Amino acid sequence: MACVKLGSKSDAFQRQGQAWFCTTGLPSDVVVEVAEMSFHLHKFPLLSRSGVMERLIAEASEGEDGCVIKLPDIPGGAKTFELVAKFCYGVKLELTAANVVYLQCAAEHLEMTEEYGEGSLISQTENFLNQVVLRSWKDSLKALQTCDDVLSFAEELNIPKRCIESLAAKACTDPNLFGWPMMEHGGPMQSPGGSLLWNGISTGARPKHASSDWWYEDASTLSLPLYKRLISAMECRSIKPEILAGSLNSYAKKYLPGLNRRQAASESSNRLAPVGSVASLSEEEQKLLLEEIDQLLPMQKGLVSTKFLFGLLRTAKILRANPSCISNLEKRIGMQLDQATLEDLLMPNFSYSMETLYDVDCVQRILEHFLAMDQVVGDASPGSVDDGQLMGSPSLTPITMVAKLIDGYLAEVAPDVNLKLPKFQSLAAAVPEYARPLDDGLYRAIDIYLKSHPWLAESDREQLCRLMDCQKLSLEACTHAAQNERLPLRVIVQVLFFEQLQLRTSIAGCFLVSDNLDGSRQLRSGLMGPNDGGWATAVRENQVLKVGMDNMRMRVSELEKECSNMRQEIEKLGKVKGPSTWGNVSKKFGFRLKSQMCSAQEGSVSKQNNGTVKIEKAKEKQGKEKKNIASDE
């Protein structure tokens, strides 16, 4: 650290307990009391350097109790006055970034100007501050830190503002342009060619480039008021928002232990700062800090990680931060909800009521912010353009990712017996229908909720199952749903109907593709040479299609059997006789169209019965004719 020597006399001060004595051979004729320390000095050195001391000594000399002066308000206290006294006696002083602010404030307070001798303490400290401290990052930072103790005096001299401007200018400048602050942070020396030096010899190695976050740790040592002023000064210099947000992230993690606990649960605890390395803040101070960070953080998507925002929100709820702070954090998370994980959403409920284990209402508000932002940005349609790339698959769009995330969240909170049906339905219905290419995740969440709430009425079960679209269930989900006893009977019939319809459509599509392959095979065979591989490719594709169709035929056969069994069960439940039973049940379950689940089986059976009746009638007619011929003979 830079320093300068003042004066040439040897140190003649000696301390005895709570008193300082100047051993010059002459008895002291003035006592200066600063806090609990007393200084036994001489009048002439003091009054010759300070206007305030000159007046106080003149006033005290008129008293009868000797010359005693009290200085309770001197900036820096007894330690600083010790240096001031030594300066008055001409003792050598060492100015540093750690004491220059105290000394300059004390010199101004004591009126140690040029009127009381050349090379006054004011001029010495001012020159050192401008020419040495403000040119160095570390010295400017240290001087700014000391301003906290004498802030009112330092503000009168404009010292904090000058230090902050110096720091802001250096932080907003690319460190790779001038080689600092690598030199100031104990980095290796460099040769004029740029290579590293070892004992004055070039090693040929090149120094690493400094990253834009080199100042984060240093800035986090400042108190919150001074740190806020530093951030504001950087904003005025148009620093990049992501760099500013990174510094706020670092500052918050240093003073909010709740964020570090969350990090330790998911990451290695070796990254955390050792306990006790930073003075702990009270809950009220942490609350104020969190609210200030929310105000300083730019309202822009992607500046900080979603995990960090969830950590701030969780901490804000624990500390009972003001509602506007919590609302702002929810909006920030809603802007980038597609980047969140299921673990982030699982926030415990910190309310006094404790109705549910997890804060479902908070997640729904975050989802609503995301949907509102999604509509404004224009990313609502699955085929929208994002970052200059056409999103060809709906699974890649943010809204689809959020829908999958919410379905997973619903499955996690569904086992909570205190989770009311309207709250579950409201969150599930908040996701637009187009955001779910498949409803498998929603079906899983509904199934878990039904399993955890067996006391639900049949009407509530049907109302809950209306959230999902049976036509958007995969074959695996349909198979599970068809055998799920927890689902209402109406839903099971719909699942079977749409599953068979889906299989028939798939089979028809496979036949269409197969016919196209067969029709184009002859055309291509006349154009391709003996060495072309198109024929072999077509054969392999045809084999794959045949295997798929065989599997589908087997599945259709199984479904028809299940359909027949289901029909028998429904007839038993309805206790209705006659051929119109199935039609009545179909009307009961709301089918306007005639069911096609068993159409293939019914068609084949009816045709076979009609053919058998016709054959029997022909045989009877032929028998009658033979009898008539025999009787005639």
Image (cartoon, grey):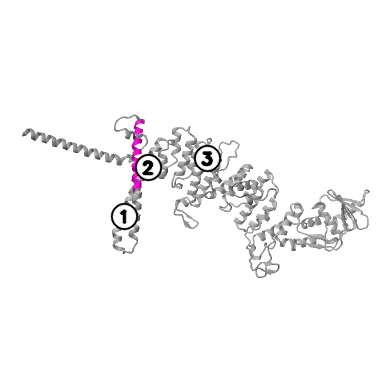
Q: CA distance from mark 1 to mark 3?
A: 49 Å
Q: Judging from the image, what secondary structure is the residue with disc 3 in?
A: helix
The three-letter code of the residue at mark 3 reads Val
Earlier residue among tags 1 and 2: 2
From what the image shows, is residue 245 above or below residue 567?
A: below
Residue 614 lies in what quarter of the image? Answer: top left
Q: Which residue occupies the foreground of this view, 521 or 504?
A: 521
Residue 516 is labelled as 1
At label 2, the amino acid type is: Phe
Q: Disc 2 designates what residue?
A: 498
Question: Is residue 263 rendered to the left or right of residue 463?
Answer: right
Q: Residues within 10 Å of mark 1 (few under 14, many from 20)?
A: few
Q: Which residue is mark 3?
A: 413
Q: Earlier in the sequence, mark 2 or mark 3?
A: 3
The image quadrant that residue 138 belongs to is bottom right
Distance between mark 1 and mark 2 Cα atoms: 27 Å
Quarter the N terminus occupies:
bottom right
Is residue 328 in view?
Answer: no
In the image: residue 421, left or right of residue 608: right
In the image, 79 versus 33, the foreground residue is 79
Residue at screen point 73% across, 54% down: 145
Q: Which residues are magenta?
A: 550-572
Q: Nearer the viewer, residue 367 or 347?
A: 347
Q: Which mark is residue 337?
A: none
